[in-house]
Amino acid sequence: SLTPYAAKILAEIGAAFKDSIAQTHLANTELIVTSMTRTKYTVSKLVRTNKTAVRRSPHLNGNSFDFSYSRFFNATPLNAIELQYLQSTISKILLRFKQDVKIWVTYEANEECLHVVARKGL
């Protein structure tokens, strides 16, 4: 499970995303969390197959989570324009959180996911 602070940050990101799309026809769209806390065993397996995985992963201490950048949960299929809008929306939110020194974020192209590390501000 996530640390209390990381869980708080994930909830804040989710709430900001929902608020940002609330007045659109995409209001029921949800982010898809693809990874949270990992064991040493799962990290060691990932290191062998994933170029971006590291042995000292922040996933080990529950301070990190990933979510999909290419997929979102919606009852109906998303078209390219809707997908681009959602990607832009979450990118702006994460930039704001990064500027507020709440997170580090990286885009993992091979996995098409956003890797987020919760960090306490200055």
Image: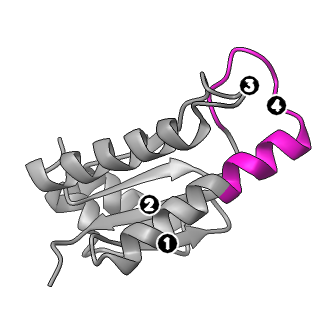
User: Which residue does the image show at 17% across and 41% down from the upper left?
Assistant: 1
C-alpha span from label 1 to label 4 = 24 Å
In what element is the residue under mark 3? loop
- Residue 23, position as x, y percentages in the image: 63, 31
- Which residue was labeled with disc 2? 46
Q: Name the amino acid, label 1.
A: Leu
Is disc 3 in contact with disc 2, using a CB cutoff of under 8 Å?
Answer: no
C-alpha span from label 3 to label 2 = 37 Å
User: Which residue does the image show at 47% across and 64% down from the upper left?
Assistant: 94
On the picture, is 41 further left or further right than 24?
Answer: left
Task: Say few, some or many: other residues with alpha carbon within 10 Å of mark 2 (under 14 / 14 to 19 / 20 or more).
Answer: some
Sequence-first disc among 1 and 4: 4
In what element is the residue under mark 4? loop
Task: Say few, some or many: other residues with alpha carbon within 10 Å of mark 4 (under 14 / 14 to 19 / 20 or more).
Answer: some
C-alpha span from label 4 to label 3 = 11 Å
Sequence-first disc among 2 and 4: 2
Give the mark toward the camera: 2 or 4.
4
**115 is higher (above) or lower (below) than 119:** above
- Residue 83 painted magenta: yes
Give the mark toward the camera: 1 or 3.
3
Q: Name the amino acid, label 3.
A: His
User: Which residue does the image show at 82% across and 31% down from the upper left?
Assistant: 78
In what element is the residue under mark 2? helix
Q: Name the amino acid, label 2.
A: Leu
- Which residue was labeled with disc 3? 25
User: Which residue does the image show at 54% across and 66% down from the upper left?
Assistant: 50
Is disc 1 in contact with disc 3, using a CB cutoff of under 8 Å?
Answer: no
Residue most extreme to the top:
75
- Residue 89, position as x, y percentages in the image: 63, 54
Q: The magenta stretch spans which residues?
A: 72-88
- Which residue was labeled with disc 1? 95
- Which residue was labeled with disc 4? 78
